[in-house]
Image (cartoon, rainbow, N blue to C red):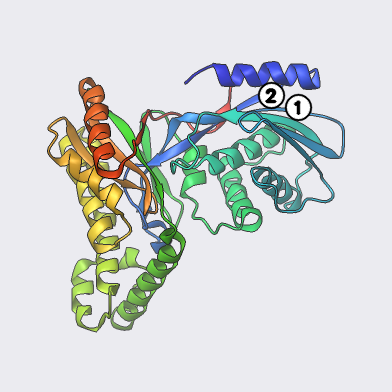
Amino acid sequence: MSLAIPIQIQEQFIQKYATEPLMVRSPGRINLIGEHTDYNQGFVLPAAIDKAIYLGFAKNGLNQCRIYSLDYQEEASFFLDNIQPGGGWLTFIKGVTSTLIQKGHSVQGFDCIFGGDIPIGAGLSSSAALENGLGFGLNTLFGLGIDRLDLVKISQQAEHEFAGVKCGIMDMFASMMGKQDHAIRLDCRSLDYDYFPVTLGDCQFLLCDTQVSHTLADSAYNTRRQECQTGVDILRQHYPAINSLRDASMDELEQVKDILTGKVYARCAYVIQENLRLIASCEALENGDLDSFGKLLYGSHDGLSRSYEVSCTELDYLVELTRSLDFVLGARMMGGGFGGCTLNLVKKQEKETFITDISAAYLREFGRLPKFYEVQIQDGTSIWE
């Protein structure tokens, strides 16, 4: 982490508002394994990372909130008694502020400057980091007494109601509840969670960004949700205890396979198997068995690509390239699909070879270079000293 960003925020804050700010760090996140399991009430395995948004706060004694984005070099403001959605990045700040007020918390006028080093559009949840950082900062600044889990729910509500994105809770949860060198196994039904050690030794995580974003994502997401629900409805007719794919086994799914139309069987099979892979991944991490963990990453990608069909040519190409590299233990697409990043578990000493070889091959195939991000697992949202 570079100290340049938070120090720059502090200096600008003092220059602009003539007061020392309360400083908050709010990280982005990766998801080690468990995609499209969240809305099926299954498990996910995210972790907060060392790329973050930093925010400086101070009370201003006004009925107005004055915000400055360091990254966009833009200034904006709004009044507390008339908060309306809209305004690009400002809508996330408005959303959290408005949600806090709706819930009866005594938020007063404040000034805020923020900036960060989370790559935008790489699927590392910069919006969740911003929402969490805003909520955490206001909670501290005004002594609101809100616990971390409720702050996570406030961020999610803001995303739903102000940004208009009906997201799951994983991104906010991972950013807020992260723990250094640990992944979080989150039960998306109960919100129970456990930490599992991520001890990589002579390996590291490298993200490889395809630099593409396909427009299929939103419509495909809705279709996959409906296909999973269709499977649950049919399973429940035979097994009344099944309320989600989380409750179903492959044996039970096989029993109804002949009456599942279209792609429903494949979608359901992927979700059931991905939950099993996630549980096995936690065991592998606890045992320090990175070889097994890497194989489970490949299994996750194969399921996402072939059974759930949310990958794309670029993602598949990047993962296939790694299979012949003996210094890569595992790789998979990360996120909703149709673009974004692959997550790669790579031997540290071969990092430069990995970047050079993958870049050259990708350039030949697609006529452009991918981007690479090194990430380490860090603590969640907190006061920055």
**Mark 2 → mark 1, Cα distance in angstroms:** 6 Å
Q: Is residue 49 left or right of residue 167?
A: left
Q: Residues within 10 Å of mark 2 (few under 14, many from 20)?
A: some
Q: Position of residue 35 (x, y in %)?
A: 35, 53
Picture residue at 70% right of the left edge, 36% below the top = 138
Q: Is residue 191 left or right of residue 253?
A: right
Closest to the observer, 318 or 382: 318
Residue 22: image tag: 2
In the picture, residue 248 is in which quadrant?
A: bottom left
Q: Which residue is mark 1?
A: 58
Res 226 visible: yes
Residue 312: image tag: none
In the picture, residue 342 is in which quadrant?
A: top left
Q: Position of residue 88 (x, y in %)?
A: 65, 46
For the C terminus, the quadrant is: top right
Q: Secondary structure at mark 1?
A: strand
